[in-house]
Image (cartoon, grey):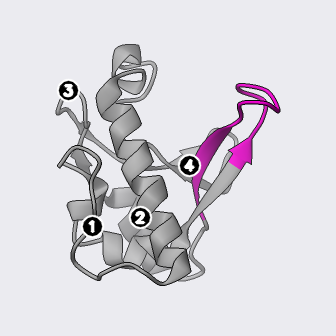
Amino acid sequence: MSILLDPSWCDLRQYVRLEVYSRDGGVGNPRSRIEVVTPRDGVLLRRFLALTMPCVHCGRRINPIRQRQGRAQHLYFAATCELAVNYACARSMDARREYDAVKRAVAEYQAGTTELHEPKLAFE
């Protein structure tokens, strides 16, 4: 299941930001991180951190909104199992499709062209 189909996406999407990260892939082929701006509302923050969904590759229940290690206020989105749990999930085509779909949805939302309940998924 995609995060885009979860009811929480309508609240979450306004906090999602794409960040170019040239440390992986270099300047010529940087990758994008899907960061989540930490909400000031503590209830909303706890709701985001408690959110669960199936890993897009293996189906195991995961928390897609996570805190960076050592940085309590830095949140990010991950559609797969943690690397220490199952490295293959993060490197799968399912993961790539989900990340591409989320990036597209964020770009459309920021451009003001998104339909509220009709996300476009790459694998549909």
C-alpha gap between disc 3 and disc 4 = 22 Å
Is 62 contained in the magenta span?
no
Residue at which label 2 appears? 105
Q: Secondary structure at mark 3?
A: loop
Please give the label number shown on residue 119: 1
Label 1 amino acid? Pro
Residue at which label 3 appears? 58
**Does the CB distance between marks 2 and 1 fall below 8 Å?**
yes
Is 34 contained in the magenta span?
yes
C-alpha gap between disc 3 and disc 1 = 22 Å
Q: Residue at x 71, y 25 (%)?
A: 25
Seen in the image, is 1 located left or right of residue 18?
Answer: left
Q: Earlier in the sequence, mark 3 or mark 4?
A: 3
Q: Secondary structure at mark 2?
A: helix
Disc 4 residue crowd, few under 14, some 14–19, many 20+, Cα 10 Å: some
Seen in the image, is 117 located left or right of residue 97?
Answer: left
Foreground of the two, 113 or 103: 113
Label 2 amino acid? Ala
Seen in the image, is 12 located left or right of residue 51?
Answer: right
Numbered disc in front, either 1 or 4: 1
